[in-house]
Amino acid sequence: MNNPKAPRQDSLISAAENRAMFERIAGFYDGTNRILSLGFDGRWRRRAVQTLGPVPGGRYLDVGCGTGDMSLEIVRQAPGSTVVGIDPVQNMLSIAREKIARAGADALISIEKGDVLNLDFEDDSFDAAITAFCIRNVTDRRRGLEEINRVIKPGGLLVILELTEPNGPVMKPLFRIYARVVMPAVTRRMSSVSAYRYLADSMADFPQPEVFSKLMEAAAFTHLTHQHLTGGIVTIFSGQAV
């Protein structure tokens, strides 16, 4: 019998296992992702930030900020905006701070250690929020979404950029070949085969867009949309906070 008091686990691995994995691969993360995405990861982030629509003077939350690329993209697209980036992985945060300092964006971007399940911010603290390649790793996705909703001002947008397994008679088998052959070959040389095997497994495990949109609705987001990019390898979800 299931224990009703047991902690929820939507992700394939625990929060502690997830942190440990990203601590190990932090130094290889950017380079490996550029290669595995065939250079598309920058385009995906730009499109996600365009969907967010940041404006000068706005204050934005970057959940699971990793090495800081999304936070930097926000201030590039909206000079004069400010961003708070949070992530639970210390090695990722260290790289993000160095990258932001090199870009001269220290005054605009604050990088902090944080957990999406317990955001350390007051209600209605941000104009909008964004998260990239993060939500599939969250153990209790509904609670995480509710926390993000809480800290966004009413009417503010949440944009989620997430890796998803493509459907269709062409893209789905091609992706599975890529995940089983190409990804392990690349990561064996660069970082961690097991980490990127988890990447493929977590993409396959992530809910279909219609199902995930229902979860966003349950977390009180409205005006929900989703759009596929690059044959469905990534999906951008959006919803308004209430």
Image (spheres, rainbow, N blue to C red):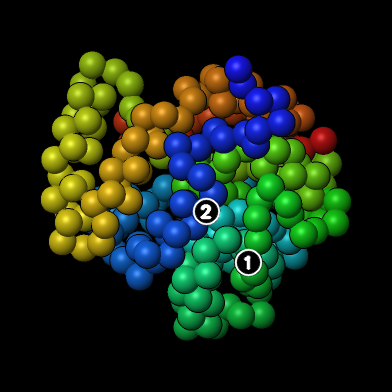
Q: Which mark is residue 16?
A: 2
Amino acid type, label 2: Ala
Residue located at (33% from left, 21% from top): 167
**Residue 55 x, y percent position in the rendering:** 69, 58
**In the rendered image, which residue does mark 1 sit on?**
113
Q: Residue at x 84, y 51 (%)?
A: 124
- Rendered location of residue 100, percent (x, y): 52, 76
Specify which label sits upstream in the sequence, 1 or 2: 2
Indicate left or right for 61 with 88 as reference.
right
Does 5 appear above or below 129? above
The part of the image, by quadrant, that contains residue 214 is top right
Residue type pointed to by label 1? Lys
Q: The C terminus is located in which quarter?
A: top right
Check disc 1: other Cα within 10 Å, few if <14, some if 14-19, many if 20+: some
On screen, residue 188 versus residue 166, left or right, reads left
Secondary structure under the numbered disc 1 in the rendered image: strand
Residue 3 location, x and y as percent? 66, 25
